[in-house]
Image: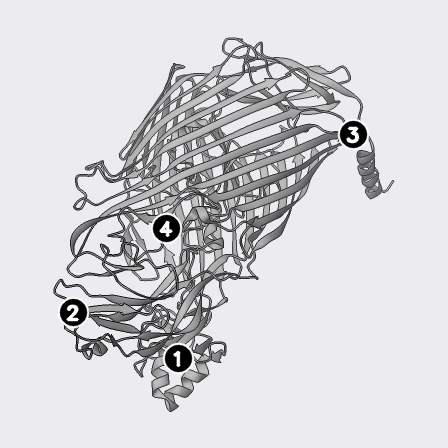
Amino acid sequence: MNPIYKIITSILFCVLSINTMAQDLTGHVTSKADDKPIAYATVTLKENRLYAFTDEKGNYTIKNVPKGKYTAVFSCMGYASQTVVVMVNAGGATLNVRLAEDNLQLDEVQVVAHRKKDEITTSYTIDRKTLDNQQIMTLSDIAQLLPGGKSVNPSLMNDSKLTLRSGTLERGNASFGTAVEVDGIRLSNNAAMGETAGVSTRSVSASNIESVEVVPGIASVEYGDLTNGVVKVKTRRGSSPFIVEGSINQHTRQIALHKGVDLGGNAGLLNFSIEHARSFLDAASPYTAYQRNVLSLRYMNVFMKKSLPLTLEVGLNGSIGGYNSKADPDRSLDDYNKVKDNNVGGNIHLGWLLNKRWITNVDLTAAFTYADRLSESYTNESSNATQPYIHTLTEGYNIAEDYDKNPLANIILGPTGYWYLRGFNDSKPLNYSLKMKANWSKAFGKFRNRLLVGGEWTSNMNRGRGTYYADMRYAPSWREYRYDALPSLNNIAIYAENKLSMDVNERQNAELTAGIREDITSVPGSEYGSVGSFSPRMNARYVFRFGQNSWLNSMTLHAGWGRSVKLPSFQVLYPSPSYRDMLAFASTSDADNRSYYAYYTYPSMARYNANLKWQRADQWDLGVEWRTKIADVSLSFFHSKVSNPYMATDVYTPFTYRYTSPAMLQRSGIAVADRRFSIDPQTGIVTVSDASGVKSPVTLGYEERNTYVTNTRYVNANALQRYGLEWIVDFKQIKTLRTQVRLDGKYYHYKAQDETLFADVPVGLNTRQSDGRLYQYVGYYRGGAATTTNYTANASASNGSVSGQVDLNATITTHIPKIRLIVALRLESSLYAFSRATSSRGYVVSSGNEYFGVPYDGKTENQTVIVYPEYYSTWDAPDVLIPFAEKLRWAETNDRGLFNDLAQLVVRTNYPYTLNPNRLSAYWSANLSVTKEIGRHVSVSFYANNFFNTLSQIHSTQTGLETSLFGSGYVPSFYYGLSLRLKI
């Protein structure tokens, strides 16, 4: 029979058949140390995801298991996971397991991230032993444990964002696209104002983490609202003694208490964790500091364990802390800054293992997160003359008034002398989510099929007040913009995913996973309305097994492609309005040194962009793994194309306002002491009145000024690309030395070239042109250098960048189980580091004051490069785009005034080396970590980063200069720390 026909027939048989032969898998789980039963251990069958929990006697039962061979995984907190292959026959099967305690007496202990071997895509796991050995302080620090990762000194002072497969100063908001989940709770930064960046993880207690899974590959369609991978965190869950942890390094102190309580009988399991951590900036003056105080509660119970297990999990996490410099006696005057970082989150999860012919299990999860991020600044201010403080929210003319006479005036006169200004910014992001999913798993002969369907609803909002001031008398020019008045961002997602596995023969098996996800995003009260986005993803894996006696034991190939979409942030959807205040009048100073100012204010609201698309990523992930007699090798190639990255631009609109010069005031004939000023809010006409009543009011003359007002509009920039290769080579342990060597590294390449047309006036709107008027021209440039949405695109000699790096790490681990000791020496090196700003429309000139040159070929070095706008427009005809280069050439000969004015739109490199390629010479550093267990109850860890304190020089080809590694940021400074763990 034709092989293709056989496969098609088998698949049809799988779909149409129903396997009615089902058996039970039973057994009990005990401790290897004392043979006591272990309660709440999890037993999972990898092939079909059937599971069970042990009761208080250590017994378990998995019902309705189809006949066949399965891989059973036994796990429980405090014990090493164990994998056993079991054959379930017609009469069922019994499998008893003894679990060893998870300590340094085990034969294998990991101190870095290791490849998760049973995943269909690239995935890395980090266990508790690794976190302890490296003394991880924040979740973002785990990036150093990934292939090619570089160590950072642990501290809470730096709120670094977690990013995967990306670099710094790149477009595409890589950290914003990295999803982070803690016990199924998504940590979202969508509702944050003022930034489009990844979520802060400083408030997550690192000491309470049991394991971390990092998925930089093609994630399941269950995970949405991402473009750059997902990080899944599991906290401690299970019965345990009291665990007391204390850590100390040069700038951080940490103490924590953990306990898992078996409530007895069928009452369930309660885990709680308390942590206090404090980092300070300077050990000589440890007052400016950031601290976190975390309480975590998690309850779990399993009902109907022997029939239809229903798992209930309830979690609540809270943290109180933040940054504070108020207590620092070395601060300048009495200035200080305080930032609250208070968070609370909770979830409830129901998992019901029905294991019926038509459904396997159902999961329901509801979660919320809420953050209170109130920042306070207290600064010393002074002025020898009154200054106008503008607070108006409406368009029109306003004149300054004394605060005591009218505290609600649109413009008030600021004080003179010295005073303190206390300001606040109140942001309270609130996120809800509700998720439901169902699985159906069936085995049909050689085939195993698992179907996942689900839906998810999320809502992001901000309940903060925004920026405000304690005393409006001292409030500088500022406008209120309340975050709690903004609509919420709602998203409904539905998804389906099917995984088909087939045993080709006894030594080969194949897997194919394909899924689709549809997100419907609703922005109520916004012109964006509802937007749909489609995300298909698929992964495939093929496994070859050659036998334990072969030099090559096994080989695994995997490939995946997927599309993922990132929802926009509140900064993109609801950017804060900007205001342009144009001086319309300034009076002479009176006897009290007060000057009255009048301004025309134009509120610049963000412009709706009907063509704005949600940012998305199309990713490839290809990999191969070999298990040989001498080493386990893993290679993973990735490619990501990020389309529609968000970009902020300015829209320029011609505008005319009236300006009254001080010269007009001198003609009024009214004495300085008796002058009283008013301005018409609509016409801008200034009237001077005589307080003594001797002279009639005088209307002052004015001149009309032509200028522009601006509005922010978000657009989609051109796509960017990232690709690279990650590798891990784990050599087999040298038994006589109890030593193992690991090589891991990465090659990474990034390229972005933007050709988006945007408007800019590089010299500013207040610049005067050759005829004395305000600047009347707007340039339209192709691509800018902005890498963030925190500011609008501006003209630059560079409109792109390219970078690449090769990092290689070598870890030498000596593990002696008999004395419970593990010592790891990690050598981190950068073999290749390249970066270059690029310009696709530049011209090379011989000096800094020339405006014509030869086209820049992208290779010329140490030359000044200029860039023209592609077009320009005039105030009189803003919609007519005039080709710039030919007009500039014509004006040089025919109209010198126009030439001088247009020349101000030409931008150039600040230094001749700006566009030079920057290659750094190779450099390295060495880290040492030691963990020693003293009996079963005490564990001590010590680490020293860059313990050689290298002072090597690195050479930069961009400038031709050499720089010391000391204090450069390329390697961590010499740093050390100690931690102690007690089990009571």
The residue wearing badge 2 is 692
Residue 613: x, y in percent?
56, 57
Where 729 falls versus 851 (above or below)?
Answer: above
Identify which amino acid the numbered label 1 is placed on. Answer: Gly
Q: Can residue 45 be seen in this view?
A: yes
Instruction: Give neighbour class at mark 1: few <14, some 14-19, many 20+ (Cα, 10 Å).
Output: some
- Spatial distance from mark 4 to mark 1, Cα to Cα? 36 Å
- Spatial distance from mark 3 to mark 4, Cα to Cα? 55 Å
Q: In which quarter of the image is the N terminus?
A: top right
- Spatial distance from mark 1 to mark 3, Cα to Cα? 74 Å
The residue wearing badge 1 is 853
Identify which amino acid the numbered label 4 is placed on. Answer: Ala
Residue 721: x, y in percent?
52, 56
- Spatial distance from mark 4 to mark 2, Cα to Cα? 80 Å
The residue wearing badge 4 is 922
Q: Quadrant of the C terminus?
A: top left
Q: Tell me whether the residue at label 1 lies in contact with that at label 3, contact meaning CB atoms closer than 8 angstroms.
A: no
Residue 778: x, y in percent?
42, 74
N-term mark: 2 or 1: 2
Helix, strand or loop at mark 1: loop
The residue wearing badge 3 is 445
Q: Tell me whether the residue at label 2 lies in contact with that at label 3, contact meaning CB atoms closer than 8 angstroms.
A: no
- Spatial distance from mark 2 to mark 3, Cα to Cα? 105 Å
Q: Tell me whether the residue at label 2 lies in contact with that at label 1, contact meaning CB atoms closer than 8 angstroms.
A: no
Q: In which quarter of the image is residue 441?
A: top right
Instruction: Give neighbour class at mark 2: few <14, some 14-19, many 20+ (Cα, 10 Å).
Output: few
N-term mark: 3 or 4: 3
- Spatial distance from mark 2 to mark 1, Cα to Cα? 66 Å
N-term mark: 4 or 2: 2
